[in-house]
Amino acid sequence: MSVAEDLDLAELALAIAREAADLLLDGAARAAAVATKSSAHDVVTQKDRDSEALIRRRIAQARPGDQVLGEEEGTIGAASDVRWVVDPLDGTVNYLYGIPSWAVSIGIERGGVPCAGVVVAPALGEQYVGVAGQGSWSVTGTGERSSLAVSGLTSLQDALVGTGFGYVRERREHQGRVLAGLVPQVRDIRRVGAAAVDLCWVAGGRLDAHYERGLQPWDRSAGSLIAAEAGAVVAGLPGAPATTGLTIVSTPGVYEPLAAALDALGVLEGP
């Protein structure tokens, strides 16, 4: 598949994500939790499900042979060269509470390798796109594009760092202890509540880094590509890839001291 085809996939993903975002905006005032997942606080709304159903329909209409992995319904479709990785509503708790930091995230893999990704955060008025080897950019409502670039910061003590927490009590307790040890070593911490948004903010220099345990493929697929194409390091601890166990997305000069600090604080030692 060529670069032109990857760009076409990104444009298709952006159109689909915008449609799903409109659906979510329309239902935000009526949203209510309808089920829980990993804990009583890990909620899903009917709008999560409606958004994923819409995205799956649009992908099937445009590219019926592709496989789709979605947060709510898992993997559907036979193995294929192209796989879509979908978070239909990242930041569900924010959505429930009327906090604008939530998004639709769609990543695309070709041969198991990320090739494109989009994140649309309609309540923030923000849209982000990345294509492997072609950079990443923000898109305004009128279609104007601006290239993204990480902050370039080199000092951990001056870094603004994003993070997130799991929903299981024991993991949250451990994450809180790690965070307490990290706070004196950085400028400040932000807990936005939607990893896809955080990763795009790293891409644009609004955050210097983000780290989190428990990010699933749909949480990080699009945002990680967008950040990497803006110059970010996307990894686990040094020598390890980003995984559900630990994902660090950082401007390059902050990655090593941040990873060292997290390692010293036992970031991987908890549940």
Image: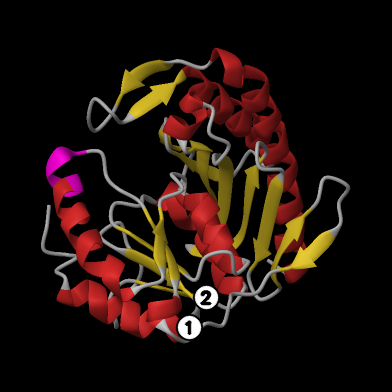
Residue 20: x and y, percent? 65, 31
Establish if 9 lies above or below 104: below
The answer to which quarter of the image holds residue 248 is bottom left
Q: Amino acid at mark 1?
A: Pro
The quadrant of the image that shows the N terminus is bottom right
Establish if 177 lies above or below 192: below
Range drawn in magenta: 168-172
In the rendered view, does 256 fall on the left or right side of 179? right
Mark 1 nearby-residue class (10 Å; few <14, some 14–19, many ≥20): some
Q: Secondary structure at mark 2?
A: loop
Of residues 257 and 90, the one nearer the viewer is 257
Establish if 68 lies above or below 118: above
Residue 92: x and y, percent? 45, 32
Mark 2 nearby-residue class (10 Å; few <14, some 14–19, many ≥20): many
Q: Earlier in the sequence, mark 1 or mark 2?
A: 2
For the residues labelled 1 and 2, the Cα–Cα distance comes to 6 Å
Q: Residue at x 15, y 54 (%)?
A: 174
Q: How is the image coloured?
A: secondary structure
Residue at the disc numbered 2: 232
In the rendered view, does 146 fall on the left or right side of 88? right
Tell me the tag on residue 252. Answer: 1
Queried whether the magenta region covers residue 247, the answer comes back as no
